């Protein structure tokens, strides 16, 4: 066996064999996400001191798994691993081609995913620096993204609003609009898939996640995506008895780029 792979396999065993901070038996990690190159990437990140232990899954999707990690200082972090086999490459290629920050001229699936991960890292960094409540991005490598863990000190992750509706929907919605405005006007990005699946309820405050598809304002599809985002949250928060409308949100955002 290749020595690098052997080391990666050994590190993988270590990550899973060490005592966990909590019982995550109900959140088993799918072995299918740990292919050879992913193991090598995790091994490299471990050697760089970013991660020491992997715990259970925070979320499992078609394209990516998000796991709880622990660094050498026993701090939690989130480890997002994109799965090569099940990712939607047509969607990724579509959003990447319209982004002037990337010049993607390849059909290689692995290279597309690597660019997608880089895009999410850049978007998170840009949003965080603009004051938007998003997880802080630590680093990315190949198909792996390491970001701030959003949850309590014992490792319980914050839940999406879809699973944990706010106690006061009106107040929560107003807080969300503040973040939405910063997102568009300060970070100059459009989320592109904003919904209660991608908004965490952390101590009754919104944290926006999953920004890999987010586009810059001068992307040709940015206005279409912004209008879709507004329609989605208006629809969802009306279900929570919030009185709002597309026109009200559009006026509040006051995005001068589209005027």
Image (spheres, rainbow, N blue to C red):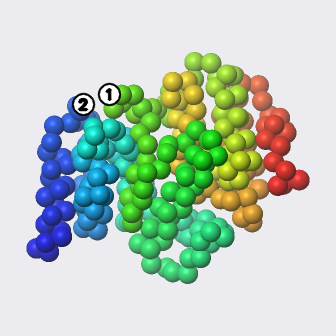
- Which x, y percent locates residue 79? 37, 49
Q: Quadrant of residue 19?
A: top left
Against 5, residue 32 (above or below) is above
Q: Quadrant of the N terminus?
A: bottom left
State the image coordinates of residue 161 (x, y, percent, origin top left): 54, 32
Depth check: give the residue in front, 131 or 221: 131
State the image coordinates of residue 17 (x, y, percent, origin top left). Answer: 14, 45
* Nearer to me, 72 or 216: 72
Q: Horizontal and vertical percent for residue 158?
A: 45, 32
Relative to residue 48, is residue 200 drawn left or right? Answer: right
- Image point (77%, 56%), residue name: 223
The residue furthest top is 167
Q: Which residue is mark 2?
A: 22
Q: Compared to 162, does 229 lie above or below?
A: below
Q: Where is residue 178, by image quadrant?
A: top right
Q: Is residue 201 above or below residue 38?
A: above
Q: Which disc number belongs to residue 154? A: 1
Q: Residue at x 44, y 63 (%)?
A: 87
Q: Judging from the image, what secondary structure is the residue with disc 2 in?
A: loop
53 relative to 238 in the view: left or right = left
Residue at 43%, 51% (x, y): give it: 138
Question: Is mark 2 in CB contact (under 8 Å) with mark 1?
Answer: yes
Query: Can residue 60 be seen in this snapshot?
Result: no
| Residues packed near mark 2 inside 10 Å, few (<14), some (14 to 19) or many (20 plus) | few
Can you say whether 142 is above or below 250 in the image? below
| Of pointers 2 and 1, the one earlier in the residue sequence | 2
Residue 144, numbered label: none
Q: Residue at x 66, y 29 (%)?
A: 175
Nearer the observer: mark 2 or 1; the answer is: 1
> Can I make out residue 43 in this image?
yes
Locate residue 179: give its quadrant. top right
């Amino acid at each position: 066996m290749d020595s690098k792979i052997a080391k990666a396999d050994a590190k993988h065993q270590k990550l899973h064999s060490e005592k966990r901070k909590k019982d995550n038996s109900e959140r088993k990690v799918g072995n299918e996400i740990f292919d050879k190159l992913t193991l090598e990437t995790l091994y490299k990140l471990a050697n760089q001191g970013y991660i020491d232990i992997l715990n259970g899954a925070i979320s499992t999707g078609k394209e990516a798994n998000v796991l709880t990690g622990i660094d050498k200082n026993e701090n939690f972090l989130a480890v997002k691993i994109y799965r090569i086999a099940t990712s939607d490459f047509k969607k990724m290629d579509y959003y990447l081609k319209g982004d002037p920050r990337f010049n993607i001229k390849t059909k290689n699936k692995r290279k597309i995913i690597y660019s997608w991960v880089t895009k999410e890292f850049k978007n998170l960094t840009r949003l965080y620096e603009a004051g938007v409540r998003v997880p802080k991005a630590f680093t990315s490598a190949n198909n792996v993204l390491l970001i701030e863990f959003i949850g309590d000190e014992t490792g319980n992750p914050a839940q999406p609003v879809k699973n944990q509706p706010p106690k006061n929907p009106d107040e929560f919605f107003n807080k969300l609009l503040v973040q939405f405005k910063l997102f568009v006007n300060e970070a100059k990005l459009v989320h592109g898939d904003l919904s209660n699946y991608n908004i965490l309820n952390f101590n009754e405050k919104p944290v926006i996640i999953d920004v890999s598809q987010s586009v810059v304002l001068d992307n040709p599809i940015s206005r279409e995506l912004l209008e879709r985002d507004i329609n989605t949250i208006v629809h969802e928060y009306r279900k929570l008895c919030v009185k709002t409308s597309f026109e009200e949100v559009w006026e509040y955002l006051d995005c001068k780029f589209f005027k």
